């Protein structure tokens, strides 16, 4: 078997004996050649060692910077409440998920490096980042408080509702229940909230909203009571056929369905209990006044409980720092605490610090439900599948019985929520400066704090409610995910600019709709076109930063047109319609 020296025709030793018949001079020349080669090779080896050394020094510096970025600016380091932990290096070195789970090399390392370079140039921010450029946006004003009917007597019976999901799904269910009560000429019992294995929150209506305001504000529309009359409390509702589940009602059913199928039960038994009631009322077709009532409930009747408003006011105050006056939406979000928010003015008024709110919808429930993949390989697939089997059994069954689109196809179609890495690339491409103050909502990121490495490295002035509020201030809300989500809702809605990463998220929809309804066309919202962005991100290995910037800005601007609510779309997200808002000349 030939040695490596034989393969490359290199003598194994400079003192090798000459072959028979070989001349001495030739041997001397050969020895000279070998000596020259060895010197040349030694220099090359030394140079290579130097290059490798420089690489490791540079890499170590970058890792140090990234680890420093993990320390989100604020008071103390508060861990994100997530059992998984992902360690991500922007250089694409070895990465792990959880305990030793391998993660492929970073997809966006090159683009993140380009983004860091672009932010270091400290260019002037585009004007449309902090303001609406479309004049028609200010032509719409709130009108859902108008009433053109007489109060309902509610004498057909009582409507009980137990809403499922998180705070945002529950809010939609409450508004739908109010409309159903009016449609069926019935009395609404204060809705109850179902305990969810995902949200794990025992909060009820009065823990989140002002119960008395809700009842009094909607009294001109429907009668509302806190509990059933005593003669009906002892009824076995399931036995008499008065329990109606989501399985009994099609998604977004028309009012005619309720008149045909629910009203007879109500008239017969005097009570109907909707269990798991969610998105079960269509947006179109629906009578004008009922649609207005739905808007009135969402934008006027549902006000947060005083303890949430008070803590929300502290959150806004610390986000804005030196606020000289309340923000345009403060009064509607935190009520009387808006005026208490003002700092004592010393000398002349100081302009409030503006901030961007980013709803990073990347919690494990969203990640698992999306059926997308996020770089964790087989270990990630097993982890998310196990989560789906526990929390989304219907989805697990569907996967086993139906051929669903592949994760790659879902991503191409824009059906996957943006990852934290994609979100930071979008913000950098839009032109937000490195010093931008960013509030992150939905901080229970899948993968833990380290998944935010790219964000914190490029935007170190990043905060969460856990950073801005003390442990004492947060204590009344701990273990109540819906109440914590209400604080995120307040901070996002009051922000100078709001960016979402998943347009299908209920919180993002409700926040953006509230900003439209009360914002007077001055509250910009960034709604990414995920399908267009997916196409841009796929070119991350070749695209130049300037082209990337241009394409991302175009993709986002295309979603900012001021349009009336499209048919059958949510009035909570698109309140610009004649039932909810008035268009002035």
Image: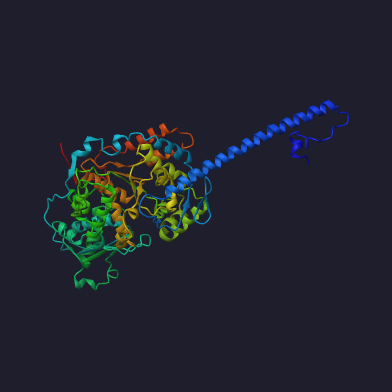
Left or right: 173 with respect to 215? right
Q: Nearer the viewer, residue 460 or 83?
A: 460
- Pinpoint residue 296: horizontal percent, then vertical percent: 19, 52
- Pinpoint residue 312: horizontal percent, then vertical percent: 26, 54
Q: Nearer the viewer, residue 79 or 366?
A: 79
Residue 279 visible in the shown view: no
Q: Quadrant of the N terminus?
A: top right
Q: Residue at x 19, y 41 (%)?
A: 140
Left or right: 160 with respect to 19? left
Name the image colouring: rainbow
Determine which quarter of the picture holds residue 465: bottom left
Q: Residue at x 27, y 41 (%)?
A: 524
Q: Residue at x 51, y 52 (%)?
A: 96
Q: Residue at x 44, y 48 (%)?
A: 68
Q: Nearer the viewer, residue 175 or 122?
A: 122
Q: Measured along the vertical axis of the image, is residue 418 above or below residue 429?
A: below
Determine which quarter of the picture holds residue 243: bottom left
- Pinpoint residue 366: horizontal percent, then vertical percent: 39, 52
């Amino acid at each position: 078997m030939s040695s490596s020296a034989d393969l490359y025709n290199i003598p194994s030793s400079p003192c090798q004996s000459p072959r028979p018949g070989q001349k001495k001079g030739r041997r001397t020349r050969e020895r000279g050649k070998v000596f020259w080669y060895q010197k040349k090779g030694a220099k090359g080896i030394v140079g290579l060692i130097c290059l490798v050394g420089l690489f490791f020094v540079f890499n170590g510096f970058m890792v140090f910077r990234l680890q420093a970025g993990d320390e989100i600016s604020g008071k103390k380091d508060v861990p994100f409440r997530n059992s998984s932990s992902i360690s991500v290096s922007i250089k694409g070195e070895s990465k792990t998920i959880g305990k030793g789970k391998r993660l492929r090399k970073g997809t966006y390392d090159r683009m993140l490096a380009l983004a860091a370079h672009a932010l270091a140039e400290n260019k002037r921010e585009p004007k449309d980042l902090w303001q609406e450029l479309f004049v028609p946006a200010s032509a719409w004003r709130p009108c859902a408080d108008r009433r053109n009917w007489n109060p309902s007597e509610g004498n057909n019976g009582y409507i009980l509702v137990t809403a499922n999901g998180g705070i945002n799904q529950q809010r939609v269910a409450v508004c739908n229940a109010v409309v159903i009560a009016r449609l069926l000429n019935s009395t609404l019992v204060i809705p109850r909230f179902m305990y969810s294995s995902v949200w794990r929150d025992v909060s009820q209506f009065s823990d989140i909203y002002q119960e008395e305001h809700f009842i009094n504000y909607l009294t001109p529309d429907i009668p509302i009571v806190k509990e059933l009359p005593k003669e009906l409390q002892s009824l076995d509702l399931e036995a008499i056929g008065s329990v109606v589940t989501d399985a009994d009602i099609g998604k977004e059913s028309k009012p005619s369905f309720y008149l045909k199928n629910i009203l007879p039960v109500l008239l017969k038994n005097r009570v109907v209990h909707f269990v798991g009631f969610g998105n079960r009322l269509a947006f179109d077709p629906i009578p004008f006044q009922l649609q207005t009532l739905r808007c009135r409930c969402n934008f006027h009747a549902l006000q947060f409980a005083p303890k949430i408003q008070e803590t929300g006011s502290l959150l806004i105050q610390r986000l804005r720092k030196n606020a000289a006056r309340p923000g345009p939406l403060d009064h509607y979000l935190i009520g009387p605490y808006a005026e208490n928010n003002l700092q004592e003015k010393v000398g002349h008024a100081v302009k409030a610090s503006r901030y961007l709110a980013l709803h990073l919808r990347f919690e494990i429930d969203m990640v698992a439900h999306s059926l997308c993949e996020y770089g964790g390989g087989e270990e990630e697939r097993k982890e998310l599948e196990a989560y789906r089997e526990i929390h989304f059994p219907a989805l697990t069954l569907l996967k086993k019985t139906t051929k669903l689109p592949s994760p790659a196809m879902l991503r191409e179609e824009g059906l996957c929520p943006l990852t934290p890495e994609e979100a930071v690339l979008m913000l950098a491409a839009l032109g937000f400066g490195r010093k931008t103050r960013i509030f992150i909502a939905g901080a229970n990121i899948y993968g833990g704090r380290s998944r935010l490495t790219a964000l914190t490295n490029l935007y170190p002035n990043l905060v969460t409610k856990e950073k801005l509020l003390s442990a004492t201030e947060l204590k009344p809300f701990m273990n109540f995910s819906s109440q914590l989500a209400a604080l995120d809702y307040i901070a996002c809605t009051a922000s100078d600019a709001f960016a979402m990463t998943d347009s299908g998220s209920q919180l993002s929809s409700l926040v953006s709709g509230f900003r439209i309804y009360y914002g007077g066309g001055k509250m910009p919202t960034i709604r990414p076109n995920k399908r267009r962005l997916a196409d841009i991100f796929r070119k991350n290995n070749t695209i130049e930063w300037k082209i990337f910037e241009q394409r991302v800005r175009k993709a986002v601007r295309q979603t900012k047109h001021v349009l009336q609510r499209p048919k059958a779309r949510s009035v909570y997200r698109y309140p610009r319609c004649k039932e909810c808002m008035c268009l002035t000349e």
